[in-house]
Image: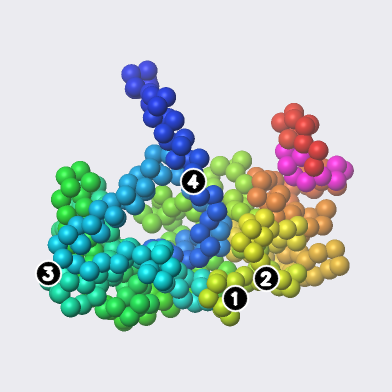
Amino acid sequence: MADLTQHIKPESETVQAIYRYHESKRETKPRTYLGASQIGHACSRALWYSFRHCGGAEFNGRMLRLFETGDLAEPRFVAELRAIGCEVYDVDPETGKQFEVKSIGGHFSGHMDGCARGLPEAPEAWHVLEFKTHNAKSFADLKNKGVRDSKPMHFAQMLVYMALTGMRRALYLAVNKDTDELYSERVRFEERKHGADWLLNRAAEVINAKQPPARISDNRDHPACRWCEHKPLCHGTDDCTGPAVPCSTGCRTCVHATPQLDTDHGRWSCDKHRISLTVEGQAAGCKDHLFIPGLVTFAEVVDAGYSPDGDWTEYRNADGTTWRNSRQGSDYSSAELAKLPGPMVGAGVVDDLKGILGAEVDRVELAFEGDATNDR
């Protein structure tokens, strides 16, 4: 096939600068809670990975700008509803900020676009407001199927907001970004049969799960898995040079961390150090980090224990080789597992080098690459 790259016009420096601007203001901290906007996702395992800050896709400037386009449409929707005579609240009068709903100790939360009454179809009822933007294809599907079948995650989001506010109606207001055509749909509150009760129970199960829930499919090419940001962690990678555990080593992926339900602030605690964990502390993790066993998909757990030198979890590879995840120098720290290629974990040559050099894996890797600049 002919190489057409020479005929593709590159992005201008101006466009690149704009994208870099959006990347520069990107929020680097992950969401601290399981979001109402997520709970309708088909895969509970993906929800758990997100809640546990396992890592995932990082969006580029173009995508970040696209997300902002959706945010910019919201004030226009609010102004239009007010212009046709609706009473609209787009922020909480008590806080001056977007309406926030919480549940399950503050670990499940969401932010409503607003609430309104005085709609022409139902003048007396208060409605949760949900504003969305769509491209032409998505918008056509929405008009054809309705929000429940076309956008089940949006539908679930509204059910949760209704459940946690006491409102029993929602207004879904959408725009086709290509034509500016509008679509609205009033949604009724539902409790059972995959309604609000089921969604809240699902959120509680994800939050309280100590191990990753079952995969939606063991087929890595399943439609729900093919483009999932967590696919390398969930199914493993075909690339033998990829990390053994392609995952964050923050507190939420550690066996010692537990979400607590005693407040509405989404508190986390560390069973190892007997402390409450700050948001910053969760991101940083510590040297006592041990991966939750379900995150290690290429080996099976055979034992675990405690010692004065640190806790440990022992695994067995498919070839019978055993190795431990612990802070002890002869074992594999979580930081090493997040860098070392899977086939090298437990390999004799790596164990020997670790023993001889007294170094962590990143130094061993750099030595193979001819780079001796890392002093760790």
Considering depth in this image, is 203 or 307 the residue closer to the camera? 203
Circle number at residue 276? 2
Mark 1 vs mark 4, CA separation in Å: 29 Å
Circle number at residue 120? 3
Name the amino acid, label 4: Arg
Name the amino acid, label 1: Gln
- The residue labelled by disc 1 is 260
Name the amino acid, label 2: Ser
- Residue 154 found in image quarter: bottom left
Name the amino acid, label 3: Pro
- The residue labelled by disc 4 is 26
Q: Give left or right: position of 64 versus 89.
A: right
Residue 116 visible to an observer of this rendering: yes
Q: Give left or right: position of 353 versus 341.
A: right
Which dot, 2 or 1, sits closer to the camera? Answer: 2
Q: Answer whether labels 3 and 1 touch (C-beta < 8 Å).
A: no
Q: Earlier in the sequence, mark 3 or mark 1?
A: 3
